[in-house]
Image (tube, rainbow, N blue to C red):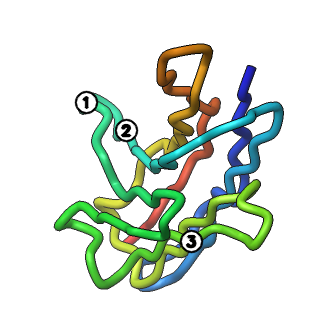
């Protein structure tokens, strides 16, 4: 079973940057990797995604500030977060969409906290 593990969260001041990492193993075929976030009292929301072809997608709120990428082995997905704002404060989760038998399964990590102070 695929078990993604996030790292790289922390506390920064507004305007700062962080790079999140999400490593996964134990998979045979994964197709799309996502970052989501959830702020206190709010629903979990999409942040960014990348597929095996390298195509990326971003929420409007992070376009131009966040960049998603993969390492050459495709075992690690990164989220470079620049020009951070207090409203970016949230728990950030990565999700790997992988083949499980005949079906696609979403595999979630435990999350890493990002706190941006003004």
Give the foreground label among 3 and 2: 3
Based on the displayed image, in which of its 4 quarters is residue 118 positioned?
Answer: bottom left
User: Is the residue marked by circle 3 packed among few (<14), some (14-19), or many (20+) residues within 10 Å?
Assistant: many
- Check the image and name the residue furthest to the left: 60
Q: Which sits earlier in the primary sequence, circle 1 or circle 3?
A: 1
Residue that badge 2 annotates: 38
For the residue labelled by badge 2, is the local secondary structure a helix, a strand or a loop? strand
Question: Residue at 60% of width from left, 41% of height from top?
Answer: 30
Q: Earlier in the sequence, mark 1 or mark 2?
A: 2
For the N terminus, the quadrant is top right
The reply to whether the C-beta atoms of the residues labelled 3 and 2 are less than 8 Å apart is no
Whole-percent x and y of residue 32? 48, 48
- Pointer 3 or 2: first along the chain: 2
- Residue 114 percent location from the top left of the image: 53, 55
Question: How far across and how far down the image is residue 97, in percent?
Answer: 51, 35
Give the residue drawn at x 30%, y 46%: 46
100 or 57, nearer to the observer: 100
Q: Please give the residue where the numbered disc 3 appears in the rendered image.
A: 69
Viewer-side label of 1, 3: 3
Distance, label 3 to label 2, CA atoms, is: 21 Å
Q: Secondary structure at mark 3?
A: strand
Residue 41 spot, x, y in % from top left = 27, 28
Q: CA distance from mark 1 to mark 3?
A: 25 Å
Residue labelled with disc 1: 43
Q: Mark 2, residues whose alpha carbon is within 10 Å: few (<14), some, or many (≥20)?
A: some
Residue 25 shown left or right of residue 19 in the figure? right
Asked if residue 1 is positioned above or below residue 111 in the image, the reply reads: above
Residue at 76 percent across and 54 percent down: it is 75
């Amino acid at each position: 079973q695929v078990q993604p593990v996030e790292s790289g969260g922390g506390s920064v001041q507004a305007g700062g940057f962080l790079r999140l990492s999400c490593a996964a193993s134990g998979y045979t075929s994964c197709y799309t990797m996502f970052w989501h976030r959830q702020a206190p009292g709010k629903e979990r929301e999409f942040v960014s995604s990348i597929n095996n072809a390298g195509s990326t997608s971003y929420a409007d709120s992070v376009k131009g500030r966040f960049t998603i990428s993969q390492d050459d082995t495709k075992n690690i997905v990164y989220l470079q977060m620049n020009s951070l704002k207090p409203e970016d404060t949230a728990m950030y989760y990565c999700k790997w969409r992988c083949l499980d038998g005949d079906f696609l399964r979403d595999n979630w990590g435990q999350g890493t906290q990002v706190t941006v102070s003004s």
